[in-house]
Image (cartoon, coloured by chain):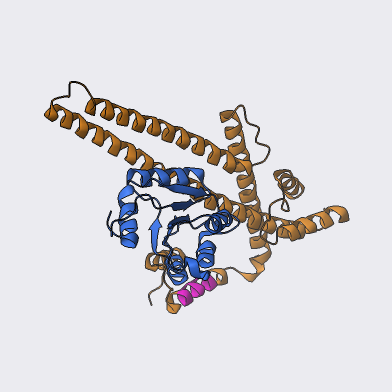
Chain colours: A blue, B orange
Amino acid sequence: MPVDKNMRILVVDDAQTMRRIIVNLLRQLGFTNMVEADDGTTAWDRLLAEPVDFVISDWNMPKMTGIDLLKKVRSEDRFKALPFIMVTAEGKRENVIAAVQAGVSNYIVKPFNAATLKEKLTKVVGDF
Amino acid sequence: MPELTLSQRIAMLEASQTGDTIPAQQVWDLVEAVKTMFGQHDVSKGAQSTSQLYHELGELAKFISAAKKELQQVKESDIANQQLPTASNHLDAIVQMTEQATGKIMDECDKLSTFHNNIRERLVNMDPPLDPDALAGVDDGITEAMTSITHIYEACNFQDITVQRIQKVVKALQEVERQVLRMVVVFGLMENEGKLDDATKAELQEDAALLNGPQLSGQGLEQDDIDDILSKLL
C-alpha cells in the first residue's frame, strides 16, 4: 500500500530549530501534514486531542523526555502500533537498548540528513 | 609485569577502553601504581606535601575563577545591548544567538525554495511554451538548487548539537570548580587555623557544606561568594 504523504506527523523537540529542520526535511520528502510539540507533555496532550499517524521525537526534553513519552504511548492500547522514531544526539548503546525495550520503531542519531530520515521512515512505513 | 610509570598505565587504560568494562587486572595495576607513587613520599614530608597540594589547588581555583570572569567580559563586549548578570546566562546567550542565526538561515532557505518553485511554475506555464529541452535543462538546475537548500537545512543540525555539547562542558566545568573550591576551603581551614576568627571559620564551614553536593539552580554559590572565599583563604 502506498504511503499516505498526508499522514499527520507529530514532531516533538524542545529546540525550535530542530523542529523546523525536521519539518522542512519531511516537506522535502513530500510530506505535507506536520504538527509540532515542544516537550513530551505537550506531545501527549496533542496525541489525546487529535489523530496522529506518526511520531518523531527528541530524547532530551524538559518536563517529559522522549523515552518517557514513548513508554506512555506504548502503555495505551490505542497507541501500541503508532510508529515512533526517536531522534537523539546520544548514540549510547544503553539508550538504544532502552528505546528498543520501550517499543521504539526506529532510532536516528543527530546530526542526520534527509537521506537518513527517508531510510528510517521507509523502514517503518514502507517505500515512498 | 615490567615497571611502568603512572602516566603510562593511565594511557594504557585509556587506549584499552572500548566503552565496555575495564579488565580487573588493569584497574588493580593502576591502584598499585598510585599506591607506589604516594608511597614514595617520606612520611615526615606529609605536612609539606599537603601544604603544596593546598597551594596548587588554590592556584587552580583562582585560574578557574579568572577564566570565568574573562569569559564574562568577552561576552559582554560582544553583546553590547544585552546585560548578562551572571556567568550561567552565557549559555543561554550562546543558545539564543545560534538559534537566531540558524533561524535566519532557514528563513532565507524558505524564501529561496519559494522563489525557485515560482520560477519553475512560470516557466512551465509560459505562453508560447518553452522548448522542452530548454525547459528540462532549467528544471534540472532548479532541482539542483533545491537539493542544495536541503543540504543547508541538514547542516543547521549543528545548532542543536553545539548547544548540547556546550551544556555538557559547562556542567563539567561547574563540577570541577565546585570540587576544587571545596578542597580549597577544607585545606584552607587547616592551613589558616590560627589566623581565622570564629565567625569566618563558621562561614567557611557553611560554604564547604554548600559545596558538598551537586549545585542546584539558585541554591549554590554565586561568583561573588566564590571570590569572597578565595579572598579569605588565598
Q: Quadrant of the N terminus of chain B?
A: bottom left
Q: Position of residue B203 (x, y in %)?
A: 82, 54
Q: Is residue A116 above or below residue B130?
A: below
Tell me the magenta residue range. Answer: B27-36
Decide which of A105, B12 is in the foreground and name it.
A105
Residue at 70% x, 44% y is B223
Do we see residue B214 in this rendering?
yes
Whether B51 is among the magenta residues is: no
**Which image quadrant is residue B76 in?**
top right
Residue at 17% x, 21% y is B128
Q: Is residue B225 above or below residue A98?
A: above
Q: Is residue A92 above or below residue B56?
A: below
**Which image quadrant is residue B194 in?**
bottom right
Do we see residue B52 in this rendering?
no
Decide which of A60, B41 is in the foreground and name it.
A60
Principal secondary structure, stretch drawn in magenta: helix
